[in-house]
Image: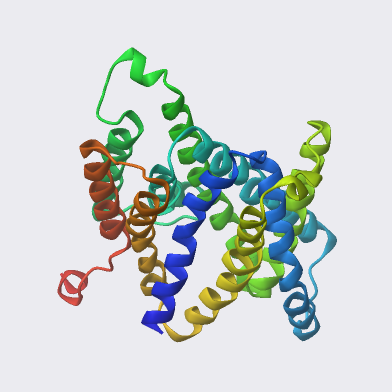
Amino acid sequence: MPLIMIGVMIIWATFYPIIKYIVVDMDPLVLSFYRYFLGFIPLTPFFISELKKQTKRPEPGEIISMALLGFIGITLFSVGLFYGIKLSTAINGALLTNTQPIFTAILGPILIAEVLSKKKLLGVLVGISGMVLVVTNGIFTTVAIEGTAVTGNLLLIGASLVLSLYSMLIKKYAIIYGSIIPTWISMLSGTFFIFIINIFRSQSPAQLLNLPTLSIVMVLYLGIIGTSLTYLIFNRALIHMPVTTATSYKLLIPVFGLILAVIFLGEQPGVATIMGIFIVVSSVYIIQKKPSATMREG
């Protein structure tokens, strides 16, 4: 199982250089539409199967709530992720969109009555300092703050924030109906909202047909393998290992993302970026790490 989880993290890490590569020729939100459209279709049989097992079906109000959460966790997240990577770098995308534990630790006490312990507070403060370092690239001047890359970095942080919000609010439905039903409903609605936005922006999905063959294969990979298949594998892993352990594997995504971006895109991270990655990964580890038995007893 550990090797399988590492494989899933590598697949997720490939998202960032692939998105950076494709958005040169394709509108970011059109690419986002295909990612989720191709992602929820393979999940449909699992959704139907899971729905048949339920003794209690989702009520209309719950379906509407899950659909609205799709706007937050799919649509808004996509805007931040895809435009953020377009304006910034694949390396920063891999790091900043995987800072959800930092925002979860901040929002948890407000939204789901989770306790913000001193350890988590320390992790949050350390994580914020690392994010500031990455966003500004260690240059704290007016010119740097107004730069395009900084705008992209802030969009990536926004993507992480809304994904954290979505994860916390969708949790109560996952407890009742399992993870597949609320995820499928929110993914379907989020994809629909992205489609409507693209129509209003006169961005046709037919852009896919104008891409080189390699890019088309990458789009299919993002949706079918990178979204649908990995989701099923990750949720299967949750049956065999604690959630904290499974989630901790996500610490590998920024590391693999950096390596892949350097190899395939030729991105060259600066000292500030590397330091920021180390600081943020350390902060997420601090937040996620369970206290030892001795600490709990004390």
Say which residue appears at 81% left-offset and 46% top-offset: 206
Q: How is the image coloured?
A: rainbow
| Residue 79 location (% of width, % of height) | 61, 39
Say which residue appears at 23% left-offset and 36% top-offset: 272
Q: Is residue 175 above or below residue 89?
A: below
Say which residue appears at 66% left-offset and 48% top-offset: 32
Q: Is residue 257 above or below residue 179?
A: above
| Residue 170 location (% of width, % of height) | 62, 59
| Residue 42 location (% of width, % of height) | 73, 72
Say which residue appears at 32% left-offset and 28% top-offset: 136
| Residue 202 location (% of width, % of height) | 82, 32
Nearest to the observer: residue 30 or residue 187: 30
Nearest to the observer: residue 245 or residue 41: 41
Q: Which quadrant would the N terminus be assigned to in this image? A: bottom left
- For this view, does 16 lie left or right of residue 121? right
Residue at far top of view: 142
Q: Which quadrant would the C terminus be assigned to in this image? A: bottom left
Nearest to the observer: residue 142 or residue 87: 87
- For this view, does 194 lie left or right of residue 277? right
- For this view, does 284 lie left or right of residue 45? left
Nearest to the observer: residue 89 or residue 65: 89
- How many numbered discs, if any? 0
